[in-house]
Image (cartoon, rainbow, N blue to C red):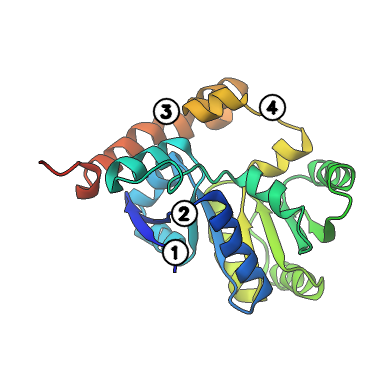
């Protein structure tokens, strides 16, 4: 059983990158459908102010997508970088596209979704993409939702990847997992990064925890709230947790 520890109000699964992959693969190969979330500072900030959102996350598997989240896990629980690595959504997607699992892509724009499929066909020719759908940028009608879920169920997919943006994709990942009985993964910008339609921060920036600055500079209007509002509230959320403060000697 994977260990889960509280960061802010979210129960985050600790374990190596490979152990995290194994949890997803196990869920995909069985009837134990999971909804998987990649937690960063913004996720923690949102969950701190929304108990229902926190519950959605805590009912699924939550991995350390953000380097600051991994740092907090190491500090709060006295664990190593091996136990609390960055389990980054785009890296998980890339790794699982090398498996023999069947994949469904849900989200983004039609153009990006097509580019993503073209890139996957080139980089991972063995990957089985059994369906893809770009839903409209508005709430679906009941008829549209039922048709979407039926298409996913009938595709033969074992993993459903969602690129719908936070927090929408987290709610939808939980709903689709229940509706279809399939394991879902809310990976956000992974669609754009793998497709190459948005720039990705250099690895050194990712490792040092300042990727947010690169992304803010790349998309200031869209991401200003996420970082300028979310980062301070993330620090507030984790600072008031008893586990964040190291015990006195």
At x 89%, y 43%, the residue is: 122
Image position of 129 (left or right of 161):
right
Which callout, 4 or 1, points at the residue further toward the start of the chain? 1
Q: Secondary structure at mark 4?
A: loop
Can you identify the residue that label 4 sits on? 199
Q: Position of residue 141 (x, y in %)?
A: 68, 66
Disc sitting over residue 206 in the figure = none
At x 50%, y 51%, the residue is: 16
Q: Secondary structure at mark 3?
A: helix
Instruction: Kindly indicate whether the residue at mark 1 contacts the one at mark 2 (C-beta within 8 angstroms).
Output: yes
Image position of 181 (left or right of 246):
right
Q: Secondary structure at mark 1?
A: loop
Disc sitting over residue 228 in the figure = 3
Q: Nearer the viewer, mark 3 or mark 2?
A: 2
Measure the C-alpha gap from mark 2 to mark 4.
29 Å
Disc sitting over residue 15 in the figure = 2
Measure the C-alpha gap from mark 4 to mark 3.
20 Å
Disc sitting over residue 2 in the figure = 1
Which callout, 1 or 3, points at the residue further toward the start of the chain? 1
């Amino acid at each position: 059983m994977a260990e889960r520890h509280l960061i802010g109000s979210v129960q985050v699964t600790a374990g190596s990158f490979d152990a995290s992959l194994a949890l997803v693969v196990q869920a995909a190969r069985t009837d134990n459908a999971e909804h998987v979330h990649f937690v960063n500072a913004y996720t923690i900030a949102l969950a701190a102010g929304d108990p229902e959102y926190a519950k959605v996350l805590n009912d699924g598997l939550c991995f350390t997508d953000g380097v600051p989240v991994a740092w907090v896990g190491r500090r709060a629980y006295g664990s190593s970088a091996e136990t609390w690595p960055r389990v980054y959504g785009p890296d998980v997607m890339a790794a699982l596209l090398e498996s023999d699992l069947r994949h469904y892509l849900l989200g983004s724009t039609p153009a990006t979704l097509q580019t993503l499929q073209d890139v996957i066909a080139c980089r991972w020719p063995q990957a089985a993409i059994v369906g893809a759908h770009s839903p409209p940028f508005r709430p679906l009608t009941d008829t549209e939702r039922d048709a979407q879920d039926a298409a996913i169920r009938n595709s033969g997919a074992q993993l459903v990847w969602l690129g719908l943006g936070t927090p929408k994709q987290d709610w939808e990942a939980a709903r689709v997992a229940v509706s279809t009985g399939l394991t879902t993964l809310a990976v956000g910008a992974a669609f754009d990064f793998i497709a190459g339609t948005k720039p990705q921060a250099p690895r050194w920036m990712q490792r040092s925890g300042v990727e947010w600055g690169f992304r803010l500079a790349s998309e200031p209007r869209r991401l200003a709230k996420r970082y300028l509002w979310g980062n301070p509230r993330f620090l507030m959320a984790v600072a008031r947790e008893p586990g964040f403060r190291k015990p006195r000697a």
